[in-house]
Image (cartoon, rainbow, N blue to C red):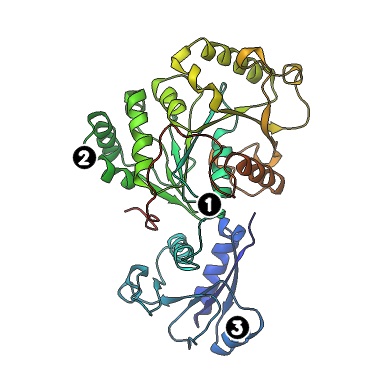
Amino acid sequence: MTAKLEVVIADRDADYLGLLMHYVRESDWSELLSVRQLTRPDMLREHRQSRGADIYLIHPDFCIEDGMDGLVILLQETPWEAGGGRADAGELAGIYKYRPLHQLFGQMLELYRSRSNPGEPRPVSGAASVYALYSASGGAGKTTVAVHLLRCLAEKGQRCLYWNMELFPGAAFPQEADVELAARFVYGLRTNADWTDEALPKLLARAEPYGFDYFPGFRKVKESLDLTRDDVASLILRIRAAGRYDVVVIDLESTFHERVVGALAGCDIVLWLVTEDKESAAKTSRLLSEMKEGLGGAADHLEKCRFVLNKHTGVLSDKLQRGITGVEGKAISMTARLPYVSKWKQLHGAERSSSDPLFAERIAEMAELIRPASGGDPVVRTSDSPRASRPSSRHD
């Protein structure tokens, strides 16, 4: 995991600073930010001379000197003074002091990402890579792996999108998709309507402090059931063509519904999760055999599958020790082995977002294998799209 960002918040209002500090300590922001509060201008001068910071969030009452080492953002008293975070050339951006704290820190982080080192090349280049998280049986931990993979890639500077395609998505993310807009979007996919591309960003929200966008899944079962293989192919092409993302992760259910097959066909890599129990191994072998025989037209996409052993305790079943039978009767190999994390036992999906050093290390190793930081994806894509500029910080 990357080092924490050093943030200095300078304001004369000690009660306000105490509120901010308490929020950071009690939230996931504590994993990303190291925050120091300053209530006097002399404290700010002393801190600059001794330590410095990545981000300075400073009330205009303080004297802001030239040549400060980090990104300086004004902590404004009114929305009008803040100006939505925008600033003309040579001016400092501002954030409204009394907006909800998760929005305040989210906007601060987006300003840092977009304005610090703007000319620095991205770690990975090329069109969006699309990964599908799949398993032959439920409870394999697809959402957990998806979220941590996206966290890892976002920390490396990648523009990432999580798309939930489960029939019954869990309440893992705070914001639900708009029911009417989602229904209209599905209709647009099916009819190839011109306005579909404009509707897509409005379905998305930002997962902060992790820095990736997400679609939490359709709230109405009908929208998911109505999606055909062609609809999903159109969705993936539209996301690629928009040029807004470097990485897209699609969270699938353990079925072979048309939309699932469409995602398997349209993605670049299938991250197929297997767990240590015998049922998971047996179902995987059976499904691979039927796919090879032509189930769902998926035989041509078996070469995309990368098998990942999740919830690994170090004790393999006899089936796994012998190897799961894959294509042409050969035992499949595991691209990665992700450890079992006992503290997540009572949690579900993206709720398992608290950091675990060993799990994060194994996720980072897997990310490097499937998307090397030196550039490009080792898998040849079925379709590519031109690159485009970085997306806006939030979707309205």
Question: Split into 4 quadrants, where in the image is the N terminus?
Answer: bottom right
Q: Which residue is label 2 attached to?
A: 194
Q: Position of residue 215 (x, y in %)?
A: 41, 41
Q: Residues within 10 Å of mark 2 (few under 14, many from 20)?
A: few
Q: Label 3 is placed on what type of residue?
A: Arg
Secondary structure under tag 3 reads helix
Q: Determine whether, in the image, residue 11 is placed left or right of residue 355.
A: left
- Which residue sits at x=62%, y=87%? 46
Q: Position of residue 94 (x, y in %)?
A: 39, 74
Residue 182 visible, this angle: yes
Q: Residues within 10 Å of mark 1 (few under 14, many from 20)?
A: some
Up-down relation of residue 177 to residue 292 (above or below): below
Q: Label 1 is placed on what type of residue?
A: Ala
In front of the other: 66 or 389: 389
Secondary structure under tag 2 reads loop
Q: Earlier in the sequence, mark 2 or mark 1?
A: 1
Q: Residues within 10 Å of mark 3 (few under 14, many from 20)?
A: some
Residues at marks 3 and 1, CA–CA distance in whole angstroms: 29 Å
Up-down relation of residue 231 to residue 296 (above or below): below
Q: Which residue is label 3 attached to?
A: 48
- Which residue sits at x=51%, y=63%? 120
Residue 310 visible, this angle: no
Residues at marks 2 and 1, CA–CA distance in whole angstroms: 30 Å
Question: In the figure, residue 273 lies in which quadrant?
Answer: top right
Indicate which disc residue 208 carries.
Answer: none
Q: How many marks?
A: 3
Q: Which residue is label 1 attached to?
A: 154
- Which residue sits at x=60%, y=86%? 43
Secondary structure under tag 1 reads helix
Q: Earlier in the sequence, mark 3 or mark 1?
A: 3
Q: Label 2 is placed on what type of residue?
A: Asp
Q: Earlier in the sequence, mark 3 or mark 2?
A: 3
